[in-house]
Image (cartoon, grey):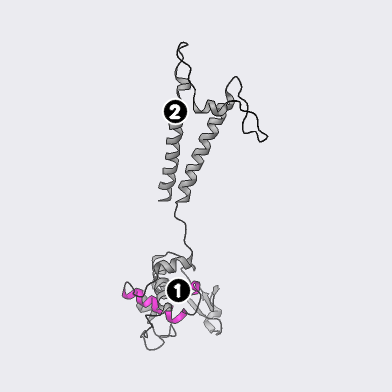
Amino acid sequence: MIKTVRAAGFAAAAFLVAAVAGWGGPLQAGQNPVAPSTSSYFDHMAADSGVSDLGLNAPATETGAPAAEFAESRYVQLANHLVGLADAVLPRPRALPELVEAYAGYDTDSRQQDCLASAVYFEARGEPIEGQLAVAEVVLNRASSGQYPETICEVVTQPWQFSFVNATGRIPDANRSSEAWRRAVAVARIAERGASRLLPRDVLWYHADYVAPSWGRRLARNAKIGLHIFYS
């Protein structure tokens, strides 16, 4: 898409340059000595109207070089302007808060997404958005690692892996009319679609910074986001 838009800008620039060149073309067209003389827009622009202190009105010489140089510079300016317009409409990466607003909602799209949003809600709803996304990424990393169950819901409900589940294997009921749930749904969607990424795919574990489990000493610390420390 980006290449297409930029190519369109270049194509438009080339078309305009060709059009302007063709418009000024009669100056070069006739060699017949009896033909009436012609002039173009660039002749008037290059005519001696007094040299300013800024050098914008260079006096014409017998060879007509300033007019040609001025015409060429105008072509370049027009081409650069059109390319700039093409760049202006290119899609820009959206920041995470913008993505949350774009993906937020109270209803999930599937059971697996519902389990992922629940993990975000119960494990990290008090964390910054980055911390919530990191928790979602750990769940997805586990599901694709081969070391844990293969589905999101199986990963989330695996006993003694997440504190809100522990031995029950059951996800408690979230307050689905709350803003925290709405954000959790957004984070789950962002993580599933890969719209933003924070952690490497081998990050499979985390814990709160106010506890020090023994397994943490055997792993490589990757990042600390909010109150959570993440390991690979």
- Asked if residue 188 is among those painted magenta in the image, a careful observer would answer no
Q: Residue at x 44, y 28 (%)?
A: 23
User: In the image, which residues are magenta?
Assistant: 104-131
Residue 149 appears anywhere in the view:
no
Toward the top, the furthest residue is 34
Q: Residues within 10 Å of mark 1 (few under 14, many from 20)?
A: many
User: Tag 2, which secondary structure?
Assistant: helix
Distance in Å between CA atoms under marks 1 and 2: 63 Å
Q: Nearer the viewer, residue 167 or 189?
A: 189
Q: Nearer the viewer, residue 101 or 38?
A: 38
Q: Nearer the viewer, residue 102 or 172?
A: 102
Question: Quarter of the image holding residue 109?
Answer: bottom left
Q: Magenta: predominant secondary structure element?
A: helix
- Percent x, y of residue 97: 48, 68
Toward the bottom, the furthest residue is 167
Q: Which residue is mark 1?
A: 138
Depth check, mark 1 against mark 2: the one in front is: 2
Residue 206 appears anywhere in the view:
yes
- Percent x, y of residue 115: 36, 77
Q: Which residue is mark 2?
A: 23
